Amino acid sequence: MSRALERIQKEIEVRPDNADLIIHGAISPAYLGEKQAAKEWISRALVIEPDNPMQLYNLACALVRSGEHEQALDIFEKWTPKMSPQHITWTKRDPDPIPLRDHPRFKALVERGEARLAAIQVGRS
């Protein structure tokens, strides 16, 4: 993963506004255990791409990996109203947010997502 981060850094030197690369730049150090670097990349990513639902989810997962659970929950809560209903199933199965599974805020956002999914399914019947 460190090679990937090196490549991302070189590419960002050429294209500093590439949000996708910056998002990946945030995720890589989180998975490498480099918490401070991950936080710096995440802050940068949120400035460049503050509203993309999938990017928000990935950044929240990187924050979970970095032990920044409250900030991750803030982002998950921002993401929840924008997520597609199918993503609630993914969120419940994804291993990244496991440390948050019993947190009341996480449980509440899953419940809101499930309610949205149920409402859509009722509407299709």
Image (cartoon, grey):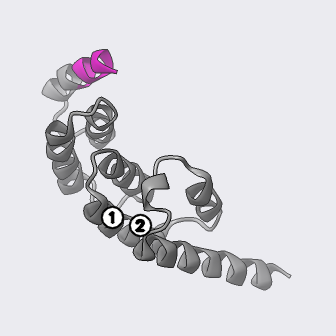
Magenta stretch secondary structure, dominant: helix
Whether label 2 touches label 1, CB < 8 Å: yes
Judged left or right of residue 83, residue 65 is left
Q: Residue furthest top?
A: 3
Q: Badge 2: how crowded within 10 Å, few (<14), some, or many (20+)?
A: many
Numbered label tally: 2
Where does label 1 land, which residue? 75
Quadrant in the picture for residue 113: bottom right
Question: What range of the chain is rendered magenta?
Answer: 1-8
Which x, y percent locates residue 81?
47, 75
Image quarter (top left, top right, bottom left or bottom right) of the C terminus: bottom right
Q: Residue at x 23, y 55 (%)?
A: 46
Residue 77 in the image: above or below residue 59: below
Q: Residue at x 14, y 44 (%)?
A: 40
Amino acid type indicated by mark 2: Trp
Quadrant in the picture for residue 119: bottom right
Judged left or right of residue 71, residue 83 is right
Task: Say which element carries label 2.
Answer: helix
Q: Residue furthest front?
A: 102
Quadrant in the picture for residue 28: top left
Where does label 2 land, which residue? 79
As measured in the structure, the alpha-carbon distance from the residue carrying label 2 to the one carrying label 1 is 6 Å
